[in-house]
Image (tube, coloured by chain):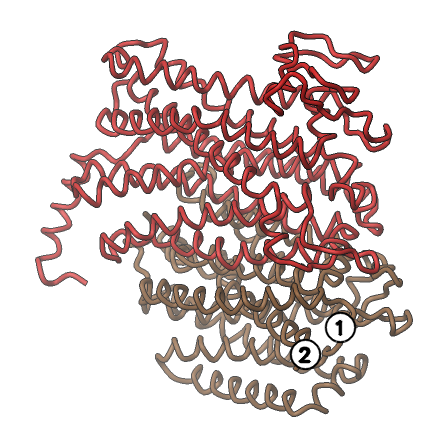
Chain colours: A red, B brown
Amino acid sequence: MLSRIQFAFTVGYHFLFVPISIGLAVMVVYTERRYFKSRIPADRAASMFWIKLFTATFAIGVATGLTMEFAFGTNWANYSRFVGDIFGAPLAAEGLFAFFLESTFLGVLLFGRKKVSPRFYYISTWLVLIGTFLSALWILIANSWQQTPAGYEVVAGRAVLTDFWAAALNPSTAPRYVHTVTGAVITGCFVVASISAWYLLKKRHLHMARQSLVAALVIGLLASAAMPFIGHWHALQVAEYQPVKMAAFENLTETRTNAPLYLFGWVNGDGGTTGVSIPSGLSLMLGMSPGHEVKGLDIVPPSDRPPLQITFQSYHLMIALSFLFIGVMLLALVMHFLKRLEGSRWMLWLLVVCFPLPILAMNMGWTATEVGRQPWVVQGLLRTSDGVSPVVSAGEIWTTLGLFGLIYLILFIAWLRIFLGIIRTGPEDVADMLQAETAAGQAVPAGAGR
Amino acid sequence: MSLESVWFVLVAFLLTGYVVLDGFDLGAGVLYPFVARTEDEKRVVRASIGPVWDGNEVWLVTGAGAVFAAFPLVYAMTFSGFYLAIMLVLFGLILRAVSLEFRHRDSSWSAVWDGAFLLGSFLPSLLVGVALGNVIRGVPMNANGDYTGTFLELLNPYALLVGVTGLFLIMTHGAAWLLVKTEAGALHDRVARWRRVTFWVCVVLAVITSAATIAGVSRASDNVLGRPVGWLFLVVLAAALLYTIWQMMKEGGELSAFLASAVTIVALAGIAAVGNYPDIVPARGTPAETSLTVTSAASGPLTLKVMLVIALIGVPLVLLYTALVYRTFRGKVRPADAEY
């Protein structure tokens, strides 16, 4: 149980930063492309600004991600023994194909502005973005296998790989990947919109703020509007392969037709639900007909059911938020086209304060899917309680949990200071930049440069 | 050569790559407070590793992932058995990563970040060697492959000896890197003096470690001396050391001296690997059958095959663009072109 708390805490913390950095990577490519085409200094300043924010977030994402990789060995030794054959490969591939790409070319972005050609620099932003997306792909392959294992057989108490493609492209990989990455893009758009709206309110860096805000709103609306369809696709897959989890999402106690779909509700002590529901909604959603039979929690014994309240609430909060995102993005974009957005202080303020919500929604989604899989760590194969390290004592976990809490708290304060510091400073002032370049040009006569 | 043995070599390659590459930036981090006095000098040291340390650390991520994928039982045993030590390495790496990224953005906390950078460089530099020492010496474990000793047992004299040797090896390596990247001046001279000291301390410690291995862990020394490839690594090691001594007595040639330092690490890692093969983690004080060997700890054949394909595509790609980036950032670092 302690290991679960530690894992949930460290992974939840890690995932505060990951979607921001994925979303910002998109923005970096977008702005650098503008600069690559226009070659005007203001666009370069904008691009460097997003790169700085990306780096500060990426650094903390990498550092806390290392914790996750190590945790499988340190706290989940029996789990590692059981799944190492299958689970280790995507982790190693993630390092080989994704992390190297990201970290190597991030070095170019940070230190190489004057050392490499504009084309090389622009390509580097793409490579960082590709690295980011590949990294998400590999780790989600690993997670998806835990949810819907495939391409294996159990030999002598260990899962042994029998079909690589079946394991990698297991039933939940594709929907989960699209769902997660789209969520990260929405998060990035809200972060960018929040910063841009703040600049518009303060009447600073208007060139960058305007172009970034419109880009964020357009991309954000497209991604938010696609989300219900992607989410639906994912839900169909969950209902087919992890019916107990689907039942837990809606607290459907017994298998039935005309299953209701809750808009919000509360799981009562007696197992029932109080709330507002659409009659037969769940049957309609999953089977296009009120007569569709949806499997309930009663298909498995109580010991194989997940905690209901937390699964139910996190799932519904995620969905409610995702519809809110469409509304905010749509409203802001309509106001932009009516030329009302910049004059509307309340709308800009709304955009400023909205950015934590998509991060919350994504963490709720993960809570729903991970808690909803319990008591299994690998669905149907290995119980979470059987996956822990037999030799690690509770005292040791308490100690490291305390240390993690302390270090992560310091990290968070530091990250916030720096992130806000970068925003306060803003992109480099174009006039200053030109002056500095002219000064440098005079100091080093043409042709005498390095 | 069996598939499992190929993976033994590949894992050894990745982990050695980690020590060679991250070793120099860890070493530079340990030397940082001692060699860099002014703010400009500190900036040069940080900037010398700035563009590359992140990529270097990925060798550890990938190496650990490869152990997980190819030898899951080893991954489970060592990471859970060496729990607190691994956590300390982890805290060190987190502190270091963050201090490097945040230091120049946050001048009011510079003393905090400098301290974090030193601690974050020191802990992994020392503990990686301690872990290796334990793996060579052997570890008590049960049939499930769980560590049955205590935390204090991991801090036995032999493992500590290997750890301190490794620390000085990494410091020497870091100094060799800084000599490549710094221009003639006070910083360069200070680094050169430190390198001479750490190099000779390291040589003395390595001799003591060898003697302790022959006396206490004869399985490993017999393996090295009884195999041609063991002798090959010993000859390479001797050549690299002689070359380094010759280099230290004259001016210039910093790059080749750094490469000699890298070869030294490769040879030492090779010797350690040959000494353990076919064991990965030998059992100590418990029945020898419990030892984790290349065959008993390996994944299934299909996993190893798929992973080999992945590695054969991925590793050359990584080497290619790593070389490209090192080439881009070649040459001395000046205080002016330090930060972005």
Indicate the position of residue A428 as horizontal and vertical percent values: 25, 36
Report if the CB atoms under discs 2 and 1 are less than 8 Å apart. yes
* Residue B161 found in image quarter: bottom right
Foreground pick, B159 / B56: B56
Label 1: element kind = loop
Query: Chain under label 2?
Result: B
**A139 is higher (above) or lower (below) than B49:** above
Give the residue type that dot 1 points to. Answer: Thr
Which residue type carries mark 2?
Ser
CA–CA distance in space, label 2 to label 1: 9 Å
Percent x, y for residue B300? 71, 65
- Position of B12 relative to B68 (above/below): below
In the image, which disc is placed on residue B295? Answer: 1
* Residue B80 shown left or right of residue B257 in the figure: right
The x and y percentages for residue B56 are: 49, 60
Question: Which image quadrant is residue A175 in?
Answer: top right
Residue B65 visible: yes
Q: Is residue B298 shown above or below A204?
A: below
Residue B37 visible? The answer is no
Residue corresponding to mark 2:
B2
For image coordinates 58% across by 90% down, the residue present is B235
